[in-house]
Image (cartoon, rainbow, N blue to C red):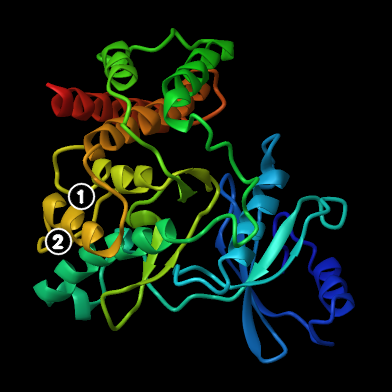
Amino acid sequence: MQVPGVDLDVLTAWMRGHGLGDGTIDDPRLITGGTQNVLLRFGWCGRDLVLRRPPVHKRPNSDETMRREARVLGALAESAVPHPALVMAEPDPEVMGAAFYLMEPVDGFNPSLGLPSAFADDPAMQHEMGLAMADAIAALAAVDHVAVGLADLGKPERWAERQVSRWRSQLDGYSQFDGYPGPDIPGVDEVGAWLEAHLPSSSRPGLMHGDFHFANVLIAPDRPVVAAIVDWELVTVGDSLLDLGHLLATWPDHSSIGVSVDAPSLPTKGEVVERYASRSDRPLHDLQWYHVLACYRLGLILEGTHARACAGMAPKETGDQLHAHTVSLLQQALDLIA
């Protein structure tokens, strides 16, 4: 089998040389590929493993992102955070064209791709599944990032004060793409000004996933708990409450760009916040600010794909769709501050 970006002979020799057994790769199958990160599941010495590496056409920071993900997954090994267990990582891109790592497979389903009958037919399971999302990020927020060796992962000093300028600078940078007419995002300046004028009274450093929503979790197949948080590309040390804000900004309530989940009995946003409050000691009196920031930040990130599409570097349909999401997110933010 030919696997884009993965030389199976090189991988076999690497695994043997790193003490993972004198095996052979059995039944290799791609989970994703193409423009997204490559995920390859295969059998090895009687167990399944999953390899994760950047896209074949890497971005400038792809190798560092892989190293960062592997480092965080390793640091979380003894924590209560649901995550894929790290097996081994290769930081050197010379080995196989990119940094990569191996992890244990997770028994679970992605709720954005459909629900198994145990959930689809049971409103109580759907409701508790939604509350379990709050449990997962509360567990992440509880991790002492210094104690697990991640003190230098981010720049938590004056984190809140830097957010608007950081993301506005990214938006301004999209002008480099030929054909991009500039941002046509109603409310972007108003929302940015509101965020700077209403900074939270305090901000406690902590781990944040950075892209937490229903499409980035796996739910256990037989009970309503998060089996694993996945796709750790944006993980950093910042303010963990942004993960809660991000969850609220993308909640599937048909009023925003909510991640599509066919689960009519999910809890309300208010119930999710109450669940988080019961699981975390982080004060929530400034939660509105984190919700608004999540809308602003995610919207400006998504606008980047629209800019690249204008330059012919991404499908036009995708760019148009994500631009519409950006406009919707900024409208959600405007509604929150009205």
Residue 257 shows in this picture: no
Q: Residue 286 carries which label?
A: none
7 relative to 80, above or below:
above
- Which three-letter amino acid code belongs to the residue tagged 1? Pro
Which mark, residue 266?
2
Return the x and y of residue 141 as percentages of the image width and height.
41, 56
Q: Is residue 99 visible?
A: yes
Q: Nearer the viewer, residue 7 or 205?
A: 205
Q: In this view, does 304 lie to the left or right of 8?
A: left
Q: The residue tagged with tag 1: helix, strand or loop?
A: loop
Give the residue furthest to the bottom.
Answer: 46
Cβ atoms at labels 1 and 2 below 8 Å apart: yes
| Image quadrant where residue 24 sits | bottom right
* Crowding near the residue tagged with mark 2, few <14, some 14–19, many ≥20 C-alpha atoms within 10 Å: many
Secondary structure state at the residue bearing disc 2: loop
Depth check, front residue: 172 or 208: 208
Task: Write down the residue under mark 1.
Answer: 252
229 up-or-down from 64: above or below: below
